[in-house]
Image (spheres, rainbow, N blue to C red):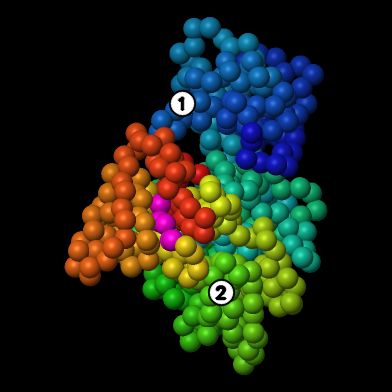
Amino acid sequence: MSEFAHRRPIPVSEIFEAAGPELAGSLEGVTEFGWIERNSQAITPGDLFIAVRGERFDGHQFVHDAANRGASAALVSRSWFDQLETRPEIPLLVVDDPVESLQKVATARRRGMVLEVIGVTGSVGKTSTKEAIAAGIRQSRSTYWSPGNMNSEIGLPLSILEIPPGTEVAVLEMGGAYAFGELALLAEIAQPSVGVVTNVFPVHLERMGSIEAIARTKAELIESLPASGLAVLNVDNPWVREMRRCTGAGVVTFGLSEEADVRAKNVRTLGLSGISFELVTGSSETEVSLPLVGVHSVEMALAGIAVGTHLGLTLDQVLAGIAEPAVQVRLVLMAGPNNSQLLDDTYNASAPSVLSALRLLQEIPAGRRIAVLGDMRELGAEAAEQHRVVGEYVAKVANLLVTYGPLGRQIADAAARVREVDGLTFGMQSFDLDQREELTQFLMSELRPGDTALLKGSRGLEME
């Protein structure tokens, strides 16, 4: 199934005008493609299949599969086409780089739109913050927000192509964690007038090398803003706070610090019932209660308030939207085996997000608190330290620690050292990546009525 629920037809002429492909075959009678799809298994008859070369797969290998599933044509690279011995049974749109051509189509589409774009980036919390911002705005304005975490050089262009006519505001998540210039490119395509940065943490260090480099990539969004635009920055994060120096746009800060323009004080977490805090904006103070779980929800709510009020919405309008259940994309509570309950936070993992989830687990009145923690990947030289920090903290929270993967064992090792020094009595069990079924069976038999189990790990583990 495609990630995009509201796929919009793409006129064939629009692709030829923007990307100028060479046509091999005939498109007689085809005036539009149902969608541009990169997953051959998600093809709907009439789609254009885009062959994307990735780290593990080359989409050109699936052109035949896309044809069998009803694709009208395939967008392919010239280097692949030139080596073909037998032509596929569908027309080919041949270009130097299919992804670059997709970006050209999205850029041309965006230039013809009259709407306000809000770009959201950061190391942690991009998707949750995007959801909160969009929820606050869509109460009063026609709003589009990108699905899931479609924030890449492919996902963002596709998001733009999905925006329906008449949209007034688009809230787009922007990644840019792998190389310098990525966020600048996404900003060039999307043309945001508002840029939101949630935080900068040592995530994706294996690719970027240092937290300074990560901060520089995130700053590209803020540097791209027009002078008439607005940078919305988390003042509590020192790397983000410094970004106000790299823009000529207006700046609004949010956070818990007294210097924040949109500030929360006296934060109270109510476990699974939500959060409450006093909102301070200028000389005004307002008591706010939201059904969002986890302390991290305060920051995403503040970002949503900052953006919504900037767009002219009232505080009541913004808060009514942020209070919607759909905003909670992380830390979802669900029924578990044997009358237990599960905290599903399998979306992704870094030390800050794991610690936030563990703090919530600590607040839940439960028979036992069980932490099921997998590897936190792409941390580079920081990997050992971040797994140690998590292990030392979970030792003081969980009645049972279950780890998954080789890096997860580092969490267990750190927890064991704390257990020995402090004389704690919690249980531990570790599983390797090839023991997925054994881990599942262990949890199915171990969970008891009244237990709460937190599941958290890097996206690549597919712990959901």
Q: Quadrant of the N terminus?
A: top right
Specify the farthest residue to the top. 86
Specify few, some or many for label 1: CA neighbours under 10 Å numbering under 14, 14-19, or 20 or more.
Answer: few
Q: Please state which amino acid type lies under the numbered disc 2.
A: Leu
Give left or right: position of 72 versus 399: right
Decide if residue 210 is in sight here. Answer: no
Specify start and end residues of the magenta stretch as a single range. 368-372
Residue 69 circle label: none
Specify few, some or many for label 2: CA neighbours under 10 Å numbering under 14, 14-19, or 20 or more.
Answer: some
Give left or right: position of 362 versus 170: left
Describe the element under mark 1 as helix, strand or loop: loop
**Disc with the residue nearer the chain's start (1 vs 2):** 1
Q: Which residue is at the front of the view, 386 or 11?
A: 386
Q: Which residue is at the front of the view, 289 or 431?
A: 431
The quarter holding residue 218 reads bottom left
Residue sitting at x 70%, y 41%: 5
Decide if residue 15 is in sight here. Answer: yes
Which residue bears the numbered disc 1? 58
| Coordinates of residue 148 in the picture (x, y in percent) | 59, 49
Which residue bears the numbered disc 2? 270
**In whole angstroms, how far apart are the C-alphas of marks 1 and 2?**
48 Å
Q: Which residue is at the front of the view, 426 or 439?
A: 426
The quarter holding residue 392 reads bottom left
Q: Please state which amino acid type lies under the numbered disc 1.
A: Asp
Query: Residue 192: within the magenta?
Result: no
Query: Which is the main secondary structure of the residues drawn in magenta?
Result: strand
| Coordinates of residue 342 in the picture (x, y in percent) | 52, 54
| Coordinates of residue 357 in the picture (x, y in percent) | 46, 62
Q: State yes or no: discs 1 and 2 in contact (Cβ < 8 Å).
A: no
Residue sitting at x 75%, y 73%: 317
Q: Nearer the viewer, mark 1 or mark 2?
A: 2
